[in-house]
Image (tube, grey):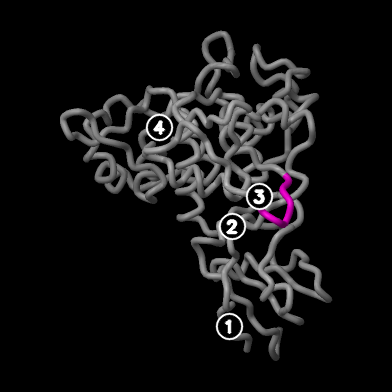
Amino acid sequence: MSHFIPIKNELQKGLWLMKKLFNKAAVSAVLAFAMILSVVSVAFAATPQFSDIKGHWAEQTIVKWAECGFAKGYPDGTFKPNGNVTRAEFVAFVDRFFGFTDKGSVVEPFADTPANAWYGYNKEAVVPIAYNRNLIKDFGDAQNKFYPDKAITRQEAFIIIARALGLNNGSTTVIASNLGVYVDVQALNAKATVLVGSLVGLGIIQGDYNGLGQLQLRPNDPLTRAEAITILDNICKQYPWIFGNLGALVYVNADVLNAVNALVVVGYSPSAAIAKVNGALNNCNCSNPIAVQAALLPIVYVNVGVGK
């Protein structure tokens, strides 16, 4: 039977990074977004020195993801942690982070999402993909407008993330308990309550305190870049493996590369196994590759034994 052998040294920084996540058109459209997943070299560059994050509550999270090449700043050296994220930018992040690629057959799901816009069916298709995935089908107004360039609210972002994670059901008793500590829970709309309660229970969102020391969710406030990157960070803590069509792994620990005839297992998930054959990492036990924040998780390899 196979047995686990801890690897001596975890990956030095951040993530196993994936290649071929973006093409040039996508990059130009979402460079302003905090969590661009882009091709980076195996050798990590120096940590970006953003001029406007010192002392910010999300400073360490931003720095950590910047080291991995995920948190992108602006040409003037700022990160703009309190800047807003648009609806189209956020669904682009979710599609790519989770590896959603099927845009379905609905070319223009909303009246204001033309097929030739950067997010449209004939381009990056991030809105049709999210629509086809049932993440945003109920986001249109009475005129079936999505408002792709409008700042996304925290509540809207929470709904999309929860649906992407498959958190569509939950115990109403548990949900009520999770949300009972928030002073503004009544501001959540009906479709958000169970989903947000599930995210709170998982630790993916926590809220913050108002001037009276009361815990709040601020569901109708715009989601900021710092908040978005924190959600990403929390997802990776709670979900060691994120499945998706994310391309080939391009950065691994030397101990993994030197493991002959072994399986590399991330987060101890049997379905997250990567086969190593003749120095190459190949998809083995799962239908899709994986992304994982290795700096926070144990990395092990398992010898291929009898019966494997």
Determine which of the numbered discs, if any, sits on residue 192 in the image. 4
Most common SS among magenta residues = loop
**Can residue 158 be spotted in the picture?**
no
Mark pair 4, 1: CA separation: 43 Å
The magenta region covers 39-45
Counting residues from the N terminus, which is met first, the one under dot 4 or under dot 1?
1
Determine the secondary structure under disc 4: helix
Residue located 51% across and 53% down the image: 236
- Give the mark, 4 or 3, whose residue is nearer the N terminus: 3
Farthest residue in the right direction?
278
Label whose residue precedes the other's in the sequence (2 or 4): 4
Give the residue pinned by disc 2.
Answer: 292
Q: Is residue 59 left or right of residue 150?
A: left
For badge 1, the amino acid type reads Ile
For disc 1, the marked residue is 5
How many C-alpha atoms fall within 10 Å of the one at disc 4: few (<14), some, or many (≥20)? some
Residue where numbered disc 3 is placed: 45
Identity, as a three-letter code, of the amino acid under mark 2: Val
Q: CA distance from mark 1 to mark 2?
A: 19 Å
The disc, 3 or 2, on the residue closer to the chain's N-terminal end is 3
Instruction: Return the x and y of residue 129 as percentages of the image width and height.
Output: 68, 33
